[in-house]
Image: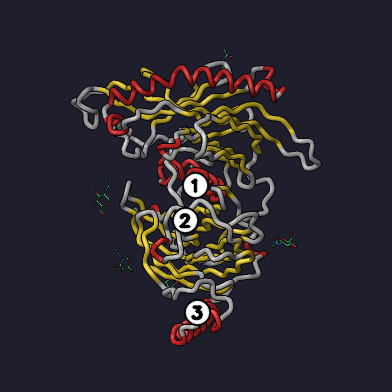
Amino acid sequence: MLPSAWKLVICIFCCHFFSTNVQSMEYYVAAVYEHNAVLNPNAKALSSRNSALKFMGKNLEIYEEQVIAASEKVLQQLSCMATKGRMFLVANLGIKVPCDPLNPPCPSDGRYQFNTDVVFSDNGTFVASYFKQNLYFEDAFDTPPEVQHVVFDTPFASKFGIFTCFDILFLEPAVILIEKHKVQHIIYPTAWMNQLPLLSSIQIQRGFATAFNVNVLAANIHHTTLGMTGSGIYSPLHSSYHYDMESESSKLILSKVPVIPLEDTTVGHIEQMSWIHSDDEINSDLKNRQSKEEFCEKNEQIASCDGSVMTDQILPSFFQAEMMYDNFTFTPLSRHEGKVRVCAETLCCYLNYKKTFPPSELYAFGVFDGLHTVHGNYSLQICAVVKCGGPEPKTCGHEVTDASSVINFELWGNFSTRRIYPLLLTSGVTLDLPDYWGWKGNHCHMHKNNMSSGLVTGALYGRFYERD
Ligand SMILES: *[C@@H]1O[C@H](CO)[C@@H](O)[C@H](O)[C@H]1NC(C)=O
Ligand SMILES: *[C@@H]1O[C@H](CO)[C@@H](O)[C@H](O)[C@H]1NC(C)=O
Ligand SMILES: *[C@@H]1O[C@H](CO)[C@@H](O)[C@H](O)[C@H]1NC(C)=O
Ligand SMILES: *[C@@H]1O[C@H](CO)[C@@H](O)[C@H](O)[C@H]1NC(C)=O
Ligand SMILES: *[C@@H]1O[C@H](CO)[C@@H](O)[C@H](O)[C@H]1NC(C)=O
């Protein structure tokens, strides 16, 4: 293997210590670095294999400086690091691997170029490498002929698994590392272009850690013009993250991480939920609501008809709108509180909501059950409450970053996949955790009260891997 040039991001983690709490939990310390990368200003030129690697080379110097700065800072803050022991370092770079061009899928120039993560131990020895499986239109790189499940041991927290960027949306290797190889700590270098309202970097990083009860150490690139920011260190219940579209500065995040990810299980206690409603109850509520709306429409005096109506326009009971290139079926949340249901294909989604601080922002509850086909093909089942881009239904699903409506809600659906990522995004692209989420029979639920800021997105993002 010939490491050709360093690229972009790093992830450092080190040593363990015990908390002074009564209930003694074991932690290690992780650091992730969001590098303000030197990227090719002309994205199209990246399509050439050589030019991509040339631009990576420019990052080498910055990268080396920052590794030194990062380790000095670590060193200052953590006495345990003074021993210079037990620090592992992970970096992402391009690697060339010679192959026989007569032996497909070896490229005709006789070398593979892989988007690669490399892991070094504290004494500088090479520990592991991982070739990215799910490329995101990276013409400079090749898909490895066989998927790699890379797991490595550390003295402080046993097995770590590793995958890169777009991999997070696929069964292989991400889900298999957890379900088959029983990995509880994930190293995740990424170059993620944020896509709201469902797939900002920190949303999916948080959702992945919550869904699988694992720790995720995620280092994104910082490049605001490409919409790249959002790194963090997540345990199932805590997160230290960074999301900054304003400045062009790099950022080092340090956090302690529990060796056993889910020591404290306050999330997922589904039996505590007292708010589950039967289909019948929802259906009759829906009927009442629709007949009321019909009545209102006839009288054209919505405000006096029902004091809780939010807007002065007559909203359709259901409408189609595109969200993240998918054709969602939405119903508007046109009242202060209510129960709504939306269905598409085999998925029915339910929402019980109450706006506790409701300015006149339009929200809608949407469902999608089908194959996503733009920028990659992958099958989805989604129930999502989103703040719309404006007062018109057609703006529902548009990118939104800020919101002031605080909404208590209970959301559930009869998903056919068990792999569901709970997403909860609040105003200013900040994260929140559901109070509860989990399964009750055939329904996956999510429950949130007392949000500290306005709701941007509350969603159960299901990946139906078997249907890809
Ligand atoms: C370097 O670290 C690796 C991994 O922890 C270990 O296996 C190896 O023995 C170490 N080598 C030296 C010279 O300390
Ligand atoms: C969106 O889905 C609805 C319901 O399934 C369908 O009637 C409509 O034609 C679809 N629209 C587009 C643009 O695919
Ligand atoms: C979900 O519920 C709807 C409405 O009750 C039903 O028609 C649909 O078949 C259900 N889907 C599955 C996968 O059970
Ligand atoms: C995605 O699926 C569509 C058909 O649904 C197909 O035409 C297209 O080639 C697929 N794209 C990829 C990258 O597999
Ligand atoms: C929400 O916050 C209020 C006031 O802080 C508190 O009384 C209430 O118990 C909280 N509800 C939940 C479900 O946490």
Q: Quadrant of residue 446?
A: bottom right
Question: How far apart are labels 3 and 2 at the CA level?
Answer: 24 Å
Q: Position of residue 398 (x, y in %)?
A: 42, 56
Asked if residue 154 is positioned above or below residue 301 in the image, the reply reads above
* x 40%, y 55%: residue: 464
In front of the other: 250 or 33: 250
Question: How far apart are labels 1 and 3 at the CA level?
Answer: 32 Å
Question: How far apart are labels 1 and 2 at the CA level?
Answer: 9 Å
Quadrant position of ligand 1: top right
In front of the other: 441 or 434: 434
* x 42%, y 65%: residue: 392
Q: Position of residue 435 (x, y in %)?
A: 64, 58
Amino acid at the residue labelled 3: Leu
User: Which callout, 1 or 3, points at the residue further toward the start of the chain?
Assistant: 1
Whether residue 164 appears in this view of the structure is no
User: Which callout, 3 or 2, points at the residue further toward the start of the chain?
Assistant: 3
Asked if residue 192 is positioned above or below residue 423 in the image, the reply reads above
Asked if residue 187 is positioned above or below residue 196 in the image, the reply reads above
Residue 204's tag is 1
Mark 3, residue position: 286
Q: Position of residue 240 (x, y in %)?
A: 61, 39
Q: Position of residue 189 (x, y in %)?
A: 47, 33
Residue 398's tag is none
> Among all residues in the image, which is located at the extreme right?
22
Disc 1 secondary structure class: helix
Mark 2, residue position: 461
